[in-house]
Each structure stands twice: as structure tokens, then as C-alpha cells.
Amino acid sequence: MCRNRIILRLQKFSVRLDNGLTTDLTLPKRGSQPPLPSFSRAANGKRGFKAIGAEPGLRCLRLRGRGGALKLALMWCFVTPLKCCSRPIMHRQTNILLWKLRYLNIKVQKSWRHHSTSVTEKALSYKAGQSIHGFRVRQVTPVPDLCLTAVQLSHNVTGAEVLHLARDDSNNLFSVQFRTTPRDSTGVPHVLEHTVLCGSHKYPCRDPFFRMMSHSLATFMNAFTASDYTIYPFSTQNGKDFQNLLSVYLDAVFFPSLHELDFWQEGWRLESENPTDPDSPLVFKGVVFNEMKGAFAHSESLFAQHLQNKLLPAHTYSVVSAGDPLSIPDLSWEQLRWFHTRHYHPSNARFFTYGDLPLEQHLKQIEEQALSRFDRIDPDTAVPPQPRWQCPREYHIRCGSNPLAPEPSKQSCLTVSYLLGDVTDTFESFTLNLLSSLMVTGPNSPFYKALIEPKLGSAFSSITGYDGSKRETSFSIGLQGISEKDMERIKSIILQTIDHVEASGFEEERIEALLHKIEIQLKHQSTHFGLALAFYIAPCWNHDGDPVPMLRIGDNVTQFKQCLKDNPRYLQEKIKQYFKDNKHRLTLSMSPDQLYFEEQRRAEEEKLQQKVRTLSDGNRKEIREKGLQLLTIQGSTQDASCLPSLKVSDVAPVITATPLEMGMAAGVPVQYSPQPTNGMVYFRALCGLKTLPEDLKIYIPLFCNIITKLGCGSLDYRQQSQQMEMKTGGMVVSPQVVTDPGNLDTYEQGILLTSSCLERNISSMFDLWAEIFNSPNFEDEERLRVLVMISAQELSNGISSSGHRYAMTRAGHTLTSAGKLQETFDGMDQVQFIKRIVNLPDLNVVLQKMLEIKKYILDQQDMRCALNATPQRMSKMTLHVEEFVERISTKKNCRSSQLNVTEEPTFTPCQMKTYFELPFPVNFIGESVRTVPFTHQGYASLVILSHMMTTKFLHGEIREKGGAYGGGAMMDHSGLFSFYSYRDPNCMQTLSAFSRAVEWAKNGKFSQQDVDKAKLSAFAAVDVPVAPCNKGMDHFLNGVSDELKQEHRERLFAVTKQDLIAVATRYLGVGQQIHGVAILGAENENIRRDPSWVVR
């Protein structure tokens, strides 16, 4: 029987207005809500205010200030139906309405901007010499280019440095950075980075850093070890969360527990292969040990490390800061503790804060919770300048062979590198960075013409360009995918090109285009701007340089222009100084060796036997006991109650609406989103693939890659590139596959056109798109071959760094029809297809395929557009969109909803297990399960379950016990629930962990508190900041409106423990699931003998 319930609520709020100001208190109008009561009687008679207008039942009360404050207590009620069901009744609608009342929209009719102070303006009030919580203000600098104010301080006692960047950005960031300068390759700073996050004096639970991910709404949390510094950053939009995270970070880095068993787990250890079997052989284990084995299996990483070691051989850069796998077992626990004492001291620390939270609170917390317990020391961590060579040097190294290389016979690499200037010389570094871009970026650059277009290699070497990450900067230029016999020729071409550039200089248009790019970068607003700034200034600041001049980019541009004006040969003289006459030049080459990986395996085995031979019986007993002790700790339930935490109630129950305006332009649907884009315009267009023949779909990623690089209309590819650089912020085309939010067997396929420009250049941007639509150039076979080679090399290189993504894509390709197409576009099928294309003797057949695709896509009927721009210019932008659409050759059909939808109701999912044999010493594993679509009631439960499985079960099993670098579970919009591991020394053991995770969830071995923590993790992902350029894209691309997001949010809030048990049983349980598995790893005889696996 259904009844009605009377909901009675008391709501309090406060407002303060200066005398004479008028305000409207307004409830945001969204959906159907009961009317508000009349405010008039409540407001009249309150000191300092007068109600001057209100009508019963309306949503607005107008008040006039008399210089006082108003406190209102409103009691109101409404009737809500109670539905008959067995589950507890949820009153989320009531809570949402109350939340909306708490955040009433204040519309002050008289301009009050001059009465308010932005955080940047407030920061300008600090004065040099001012003392704040034990810190002294050294300098305050406005940085109008970046809309911020820089405040530099130092700690009175320890000398710790602080840089605060005050900016009107709610995504506040903190980082603490230490100069870490190891003198051996044991990886001590890297192992220490891991180990300090395993517990501290104030937070003694195991791995508080990782567990804070489920106690927080952080938008970013991580730690990084560079060649000469270690940095710990986090960001969040919640002030309370910021203080919580800051407390955990400060205690972790300054007062870590550094238990020996944590060192064993994170660094390295000798342990029985099976710790419970005393007769199993001893092996090396450890997270960092396995991470670095995986890293150096990647030839690009190996080459970059050797280049640093050989170009800068005199000090800390001569060793492997992250750790050489063969040297990591030489690191002792005592050495780790000593390194922490010396390097993780406030006298060696640099604190960085960014955003709109008050500086005073940050300084107070840093002082009270950390620095007040230290005195000043001399950490002695400075890096001296590298002594300069009197003549150039050459070295050759070996690497493993890559079976996915575009051309198996051309896997060598050669690079010429120059040591340049001091990283603390801000303007010289700025100039050299620009000079590097002029020499290597784009088809108009001299080195592109000299090295890429003759097809001597497949692409530039991965380290080509300017490197400003160390004490002294460098520049490298070279090729990968070359033949050994061409090495001398390539080296000669590089030196000749330097001579040519020094003699002839650069075209004025190219310099102009580069300065335009800087202007774009200054105006573009990203979601993690604070994080980007932290990494941008880190190298200079790390070596006692002043970071603030780096931020004043406009000043550097002005000075650069003046230098060019005063001396037309300014850049040519820099070429002569830093390249032509520079004797500190290194030529490094690398060639594959079929025996390389086997030799590495034997070297590791020899190192292991050396360790084992020195063990006494007592040592062996101690190893067994500590191994079992570690296993017990890893398997025990940890009490994380000591950690500070937000609550689910701290999460906003209602999303922030994105204003969208839907319109038509010459019959094409257009979504307009007025945003504070800072004078930038962001354009997207989606063209459908539904009518494209199946045999052409494998070519779509290649089509997208080359369509903006072949030339169009009267422009050849060089001219096209020049115009794109001078008039846009980039023009990109990419494949698009999106599962319908309500049906796993329905999806949309298309290609997405993305571009941006300054408002003044919108006509030029649309001119370029119109030419690409109407007159693309598919006639230059040689240009196509160059682009195909580059694409193939990039795909091949990406596998070792993103292998888990390839594994998950492959695992899901037989589970949904969209998954099958995703594998075609982004999976191993695409990698192997492009490899075959590279080896075709004649690419004219490919050009014909491109022409066919163009007819189906750029000339077909289904298209929609989106535009994000400033509200003031939106009407003008609308006219440009309409003009562009009218210029496209074929008239588009009028569509008002999602286009290009493909329905496959007869699709039958099937199970498949695939193993890709690759020469990796570690594995990448993915397992995917077909579940439910986004709008299904169970989707939210599966999202929460994925977060809880990761933090409460899989992290311990895969990383802590198994030694993998990473692993977890995820639920995405495709309706696939996926498990994954990354740089994993195990294979079947990890698959077993995936299965046991499901049993753990089915048996409900978790608490409601665990569910609530998982909700925080889920909301942190849901509420990730969105830049103005990307607002409305969920609606445009995925068909997910604000209403659908809010419904999903409500379902997340409502998830219970029983819901998680139910979805684990129904969708993930053995016998219920339809799943796929894929592994990328070394040859595995057990899998080869198993007929259930497809080995490729």
C-alpha cells in the first residue's frame, strides 16, 4: 500500500550585505521541486535587512542591506510519495533540495566586484620581509601572463623554500621536492620514494598513501623520482581534503616508518619462489626491481638512460637514479635510511602550493606538523657543473630485438647530443628551447627535411629535442628504425644540417608560428595547470635557480623579439656557439642483439647465485622467517582508522550544470557551450562511419593520422603545416567508438575532428577544415610512406609502456560489437596491420583506400558539431560555423539526436583467451567481463565494486604479494568490467587473484565503511575537473546529459553492501560471466600447451 510522507525541514543560512546593496536569494531551478515559502515575513524586522519584494510560492527573495548580517531559519514542508518496496526508502531528493537551499544563488544587482578581492590581488598585499608562521616573505611578483601572483618565502630556521602561486583556480595543488643525488645505481632514491609511502609515525598503517585514495576526493596523487630530485604532488578541490592530504604527505616524507619489511616489499628481497614452501628456490622479488626490469626491456628507455650516463659522466647523472635491475640487489636497508636522513630534510626541501586556498593555512600546517621539529643543516646535495670535453665522444650499446618493429632489419638507433647551458639561466634556456623547436618540429624544420623525408629511419629518436630536466641542458637529434650500415651517413647529415642552419637561419614565418604557439599555450586553460607548473619549474628550482622568471613568459618573448630585432643573426650565432663549435658532443648508437634478453636473464641469474652462495644456514632461516612474516602482514586486515578522511556527506549531491545551447547550422546539429575560454575557440565535428564497408574500417586510424598531413586544396603538406601552426592550436582527427549508454549492443562509430584557435583566427581555421573536407591530397605516395613509418614506430614503441591497455582492449573484443571495433582501431590488430602496410612495396593501393574512405566519411550525410567559446563572442562564432558547413561539398541531413548508431541485436558474445608472445621480462594482463550499460541500475554498483576491489584486495595480492608495478579493476562506459596488471612478474598467479577477488566480493568480506571509502574514490573520478574547452563533451560525444549524470550520481550514493554482493554474484561469478582474457608477455610453455589459449 502506498502512502504519502510529510517531510519537515529546518534550513538556516547567513548573508551579509553592505549598506544600499541589493541581493536576490534564488533557488537554482532544476527539475520539478516544491515551491519555496514566502520569505517576506521571515526577513522583515531582522537587523540590517529589509525585505523589499517577495511573493508567496516564488523562488526569489529580494533584500536590501543596511550594513548588517542576516540569519534566516526557514521551516518548510512538502509531500512526497512513499513507494512500496522491500529496500530501505531513500530520501535523496529531499537531501538534494536542502543542499540547493544551502547554496543559494546570490545575484547582487549593484556591481560588487570592487568590494571583493581575488586571491591574486590579495597575494599582492604580502610584503618582502613579512613574517608568516615561521616563514619570511622574500619576494612578491605579479605574473599577469598566467593570471597569478607568485609569493616566494623561506623558512627562518631550516631555510626550506616555499613558492606559492595564488590563482583563482579551485583545483589546489601541493608538492614537496627534494634534491636527491645518488652516486650509485642501486636506485636508492626510487626505492625510498616507494618506501616512505608505506607508513609513518603519525599514520602507522600499511601504505597510507594508497589508502588515502579511498579517503579523499583528490584529483591527483602520486610521487616521482627524476634523475636528481624526487617530488610528491597532490591536488584537490576540497579545502578539508587539502589539509588531510597535506598532513599525510608531510608525515610520510619527514617522519616515515621505513620498516625493513617495507624495504623488502618495495625495493628488493631474496625470497622463496613460494614463501610457504621452504624447498622452493630463492628468487629476487620487489616492486621497484620488477618495475625497472620492465622499464629497461623498452629499448627507448634503455637508450635514454645510457645517453644521460655518457653525456654527463662526472657526477650523479652517471648512475641510474631509478635503479639498474642488476644493481638494485646491492642496496641495503641501512643505506636507504641514511639517504633519507641526508636528503629528506627541510634544508633540502622546496614546497610548492598553488590555487585559491589561503597561503597562511598552508604555512601554519607545514610549520606545526613538520618544520618546527628540525634545525638547519648543510645537506651537501649540490650538483657541480659537468667538466667540458675537449673533443667529441662516441659510444655503441646493444638492446633486445623487437618482433613488432616496422622493419625487422632496421631496428638500430643513432643520436647526436650536445651539452648546452645552465638550466638556471632562464632566458638562455627559453631561447634554446625555441631554437630546438625550430630545428626539429614539423615538416618545415631542417632536420625533418634532412632525416625523415629521405626515409633513412622510421622516425626521430624518442629523445630528440631540447632537454631542460637536469643541471645543464642538452639537445639531441637522431633517428630510430635505421640500418646499421647507414649510421655514418646519418651522422654526417646531422653535422651538415647544423652547418646549413648556421649559414642560412630560419624563415621569418616559422619564428612567427612558434611565437603564435606560445600565445596559444598561455591562453589555453587545462584542468591540471598547477601540476604542469610544478613540473615546469622543478629542474631550475632544484638547482637553486629562481623559478619566477620562468613563469613570466611574456617577458621572455619580448626579450627574444628584441634580440632578433637588434641582431638578425641572433639564432645563427646560437647555433654556432652551442652546436657547430661545441666539443661536448656525444654520438650514441644502439643495435639489436638476438641474444640480449637471454644475456640479461643469465646476468640476473648469476647475480642471484652470488647472493645465494654467501648465505649461511642462519641467513636462509632468517629469509624464510621474514618471508613468512611479510606474507602474514600482507594478508592481514589493516586498520586505517588513523588516517584523516572525508565522508560521503562531504560530496556534493548535485552536479554543476553545464550550459548548452542546441542549434542548427545549414542543417547540421550544433552544440554550443559558452565558457570562459580566455579568447580561445574549440571546435569539434563528428562524422559517421555507419555506411563504411567493413573491409575499410581497419584503415580508419591511418586515415585519421594522415588526413591533416598530406596537403589540401592549393596547399602542399609543408604549406598546410605552416598554416596550421600560424592559425590554429592544432588540428587532429581520431577514431571514435562509443557504446550507447542504455544498450551494450548499440554503439556509435565515427571520426572526430578536433581543433582550436584564437578568436581572431577562426575564419582561417575553418578555411583549413573546408579544404580538408573538399580537396584532400591523396596523391603523394612518398609522403604517405613517411607518415606510415612514423605511425608504425609510434605504435610499436607504445606497447611496452601501455601493454595493460592493449591487453584489456583485446580481452574485450569478443564481448561486445563495439569492443570488436575498438580492437580494430586501437588494439594489437591495428599494430600488426600497420606493420604489414609498412612493408608493402607499393602504397598506391593504400592511397586508393584513403580516397574511398573520404567519399564515405567527409562526403556522407551524418555529421554534428560542437563549439566552446566565450559567451560574448558566441553569436559571431555561430556565423562562422554556419559558413563552414555551407562550404562543405555535400548538404548534410538534419538530425537532432545521436547519429550514426549501429545496432547489432544478434551479436553473440563469446569467450576467448589470447596470449601475445613478446620479449618482455614482465607481463601485461587484462581480463574483461561483459556486464551492463551506463544507465542500468547495476552499473553504479559495479563502479563502486571496481574501486573497492582495487584498494581492498587486488592491490595487496598483485602489487604487495606479487611484486607487480600495478594492478586493479575498472568499470568503463563500454559496459565491460576489467581486471588488469602492469609490469607483472607473474601470469597465472595474477589470473587466480582476479578470480579470488570475485569470490571475496561474493562472500561479502568487506564492511559498509569499505563501501563508503570506495564511494569517495568513485566520486573523485566522477568529479575530476573539466577544462572550459572540454565542457559538454560527455553530452556531445557519449550522449550522457547532465540529467543522466545526476541519475548516475544518485545511484552511486545509494549503493549498499548487499548491492555489491549481488552484482559480483550475478555478473562476475563463475558460471555467470562472459569474459575474455589477454596477456602480453614472454614465451610461456604452460600456456602454449593449453588448447584453451590462442597464442600469437
Image (cartoon, grey):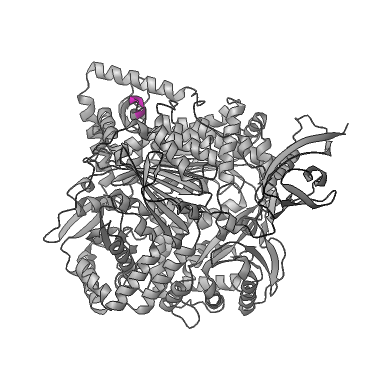
Q: Which residues are magenta?
A: 257-262
Q: Residue at x 74, y 49 (%)?
A: 27
**372 or 980, which lies in front?**
372
Q: Position of residue 897 (x, y in %)?
A: 71, 61
Image vertical order of residue 119 relative to residue 785, above or below: above
Horizontal side of residue 115 vs 643, given as left or right? right
Q: Position of residue 955 (x, y in %)?
A: 47, 33
Quarter of the image containing the N terminus?
A: top right
Q: Name the residue at the bottom extreme.
A: 714
**119 or 29, which lies in front?**
119
Residue 259 on the magenta span: yes
Horizontal side of residue 61 vs 636, given as left or right? right
Horizontal side of residue 73 vs 371, given as left or right? right
Q: Position of residue 975 (x, y in %)?
A: 62, 46
User: Is residue 614 shown to the viewer in this render?
Assistant: yes
User: Is residue 963 shown to the viewer in this render?
Assistant: no
Residue 601 on the magenta span: no
Q: Residue at x 59, y 34 (%)?
A: 647
Q: Position of residue 703 (x, y in %)?
A: 50, 67
Total numbered badges shown on the rendered structure: 0
**511 or 755, which lies in front?**
511
